[in-house]
């Protein structure tokens, strides 16, 4: 006999309530491999259909937010998807990934897959096209692109603040503070 994911193997010890025999119990093997004892009335009424593994799976799915959030931890793929949707520089994202009620994140995960390692970042092979199924992939050790925050002329060359701070041997944060306070570039870059 089979009920849900349970296959009845043999009769177990009877269920006693307040010292009296109340119900028969059956030993059942679940599809997941666990053995469990179930009261006969619960098998007949189909109220118990597994060893508890289905309830655990349903609860886990309920806790996951769009498949990307569980127990206060957020999957890196979820952060990447959120960053795509909230970028201020006008990067376009396909309609499929912008769908609501978790469907957008699910579609994003189906198309791009899980991030292979923490070194990987989401990139677009063709920057002229929107982020979408054919134009997004995980790449390792990708240098950050974009317009530098500020260029400075130092020793006859134009360079970013990071480059200038590194070449001058001045901590980047200190250089930024000095420039915010109005220091000339040559003086700010002195160690």
Image (cartoon, rainbow, N blue to C red):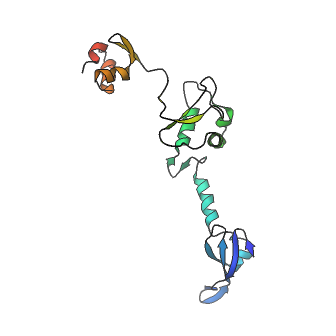
Position in image of residue 37 (x %, y %): 63, 78
Which picture quadrant has residue 149?
top left
**Quadrant where the N terminus is found in the figure:** bottom right
Return the residue found at the far top. 156
In the displayed structure, 15 sits above or below 151; it is below
Seen at 28% across and 18% down, the residue is 189
On the image, the x and y values in percent for residue 3 come to 73, 71
Residue 176 x, y percent position in the rendering: 34, 22
Can residue 27 be spotted in the picture?
yes
Q: Is residue 150 above or below residue 122?
A: above
Which residue sits at x=53%, y=45%?
A: 75
Q: Residue furthest bottom?
A: 20
Indicate the quadrant where residue 52 lies.
Answer: bottom right
Residue 101 in sight from this viewpoint: no
Residue shown at 56%/42% (left/top)?
78
> Which residue is more in the foreground, 40 or 12?
12
């Amino acid at each position: 006999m089979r009920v849900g994911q349970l296959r009845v193997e043999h009769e177990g010890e009877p269920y006693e309530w307040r010292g009296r025999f109340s119900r028969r119990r059956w030993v059942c093997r679940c599809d997941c491999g666990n053995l469990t004892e179930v009261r006969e009335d619960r098998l007949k009424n189909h109220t118990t259909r597994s060893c508890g593994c289905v309830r655990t799976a349903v609860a886990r799915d309920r806790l996951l937010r769009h498949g990307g959030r569980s127990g206060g931890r957020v999957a890196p793929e979820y952060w990447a998807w959120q960053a795509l949707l909230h970028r201020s520089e006008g990067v376009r994202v396909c309609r499929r990934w912008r769908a609501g009620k978790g469907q957008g994140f699910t579609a994003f995960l189906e198309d791009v897959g899980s991030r292979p390692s923490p070194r990987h970042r989401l990139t677009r092979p063709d920057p002229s096209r929107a982020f979408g199924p054919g134009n997004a992939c995980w790449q390792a050790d990708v240098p950050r692109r974009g317009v530098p925050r500020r260029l400075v002329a130092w020793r006859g060359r134009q360079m970013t603040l990071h480059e200038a701070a590194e070449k001058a041997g001045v901590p980047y944060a200190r250089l930024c503070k000095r420039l915010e306070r109005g220091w000339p570039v040559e003086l700010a870059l002195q160690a």
